[in-house]
């Protein structure tokens, strides 16, 4: 089932409400980088995000190098940003 | 403390013993890509690798997109591949 991509106006409003996230240069994803004290803390954070992702059935594209975690959110079924990305970003920001 | 980089001969021997890993084009890291049935399985695998990494105090550079996991191993303190990468790769292969 196709998921609706955010309109430019919706996207701008979402980004304004998610000041710690950046729009990827192609406009199809949002990204946020995190830094922790060590791998243990980074992994603890990732574990919490993994639970959120499964609960929302929407999964990040992400990478980890020791204490750093980079998260990219996009919705393949929408060909870009959707409300699912906004919802997951909001949840991540509450951690 | 600087860690010894593998000699070319040691590197070749290690790669021969790790047929599922590839040498990165710059010769300074080894990589392996994994594919699972779903995110839950991918995450379970990553959790086991995380425990290995902490136990060995040597951590991967890795990324995950849903059911796919890509692992890169290199040793920054050696400026390339070291015995630590080989040891972690061997442990990952036993999972």
Image: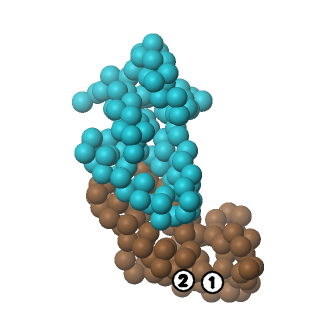
Chain colours: A cyan, B brown
Which residue, given by chain and number where applicable, does mark 2 sit on? B87
Check if mark 2's residue and mark 1's residue have beta carbons within 8 Å: yes
What residue is drawn where x is 38% and y is 23%?
Answer: A5
Front residue of B73/B18: it is: B73
Q: Is residue B56 above or below residue A36?
A: below
Q: Position of residue B80 (x, y in %)?
A: 70, 72
Q: Is residue A7 left or right of residue A33?
A: left
Relative to A59, residue A47 above or below:
below
Residue A76 seen anywhere in this rendered image of the structure? no
In the drawing, what numbered circle is on residue A70? none
Rendering coords of residue A28 (x, y %) = 49, 29
The residue under label 1 is B83
Quadrant where the image shows the C terminus of chain A:
top left
Could you give the CA–CA distance between mark 2 and mark 1, rounded to whole angstroms? 6 Å
Q: Is residue B27 left or right of residue A69?
A: right
Where does the image place residue A27, in percent across and percent down from the top left?
53, 26
Q: Residues within 10 Å of mark 2 (few under 14, many from 20)?
A: some
Question: Which quarter of the figure has residue A82?
Answer: top left
Q: Is residue A27 above or below residue B6?
A: above
Q: Are marks 2 and 1 on the same chain?
A: yes
Dot 1: chain letter: B
Q: Chain of mark 2?
A: B
Q: Residues within 10 Å of mark 1 (few under 14, many from 20)?
A: some
């Amino acid at each position: 089932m196709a998921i609706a991509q955010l309109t430019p106006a919706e996207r701008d409003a979402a980004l304004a409400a998610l000041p710690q996230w950046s729009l990827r240069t192609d406009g199809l994803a949002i990204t946020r980088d995190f830094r922790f004290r060590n791998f243990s803390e980074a992994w603890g954070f990732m574990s919490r995000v993994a639970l959120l992702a499964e609960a929302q059935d929407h999964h990040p594209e992400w990478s980890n190098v020791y204490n750093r975690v980079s998260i990219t959110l996009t919705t393949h079924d929408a060909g870009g940003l959707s409300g699912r990305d906004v919802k997951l970003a909001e949840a991540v920001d509450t951690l």
